[in-house]
Image (cartoon, rainbow, N blue to C red):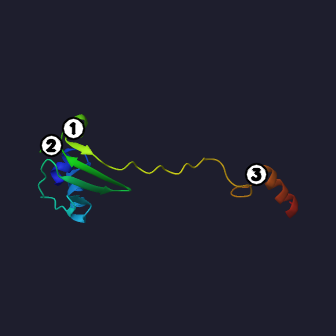
Amino acid sequence: MDAWTWAVRLFPTRSAAAAACRAGHVRVNGDRAKPATMVVPGDEVHVRGGERERIVVVQRTVVKRVGAPVAVACYLDRSPAPLPKEHVVPGERDRGAGRPTKRDRRLIQRLKGR
C-alpha cells in the first residue's frame, strides 16, 4: 500500500506514505490499511491528508515510482471537489482598527499637548 500510494504520487515520499498508513489515514475498501497491504485493480482507496480527502479507484498496480502522466492513468480519481477558500481582500480594515493614520496621529498629539 505505501509503495503504491508513493508510486502514483499521492504522497511525496514512501516514508510519508507508510506513516499515513500506520496513523490510519489510508483505507482500502473501507478497512484501515497497513503499509504492507496489497492493492489490486478495482480497490477503492481513501487517503486523508491535510484538509483534503482523496478517493481513488485502483486501475493499474505499479511497483516503481512513475511520472505524473503515467501516475494519473493508474487510478480513477473520485475525490470530492475541494472547498473554496474564503476570499479575504488584503489591505482593507475597519476604520479605527490598527495603526493610526497621519491625521489621527496629529489629533492625538494635539490632545496630549505635544
Return the residue nearer the eye: 73 or 7.
73
Image position, residue 2 (x, y; %): 18, 54
Q: Earlier in the sequence, mark 2 or mark 1?
A: 2
* Residue type for callout 3: Thr
Image position, residue 114 (x, y; %): 86, 60
Return the residue nearer the eye: 75 or 95.
75
Which of discs 3 and 2 lies nearer the camera? The answer is 2
Residue under circle 2? 60
Image position, residue 22 (x, y; %): 21, 64
* 5 over 33 or under it: above or below: above
Q: How many marks?
A: 3
Q: Are marks 2 and 1 in contact (CB under 8 Å)?
A: yes
Mark pair 2, 1: CA separation:
8 Å
Residue at the image position 30 percent from the left and 57 percent from the top? 48
The reply, left or right, for residue 102 in relation to residue 41 is right
The circle on residue 101 is 3
Which of discs 3 and 1 lies nearer the camera? The answer is 1
Residue under circle 1? 73
* Residue type for callout 1: Ala
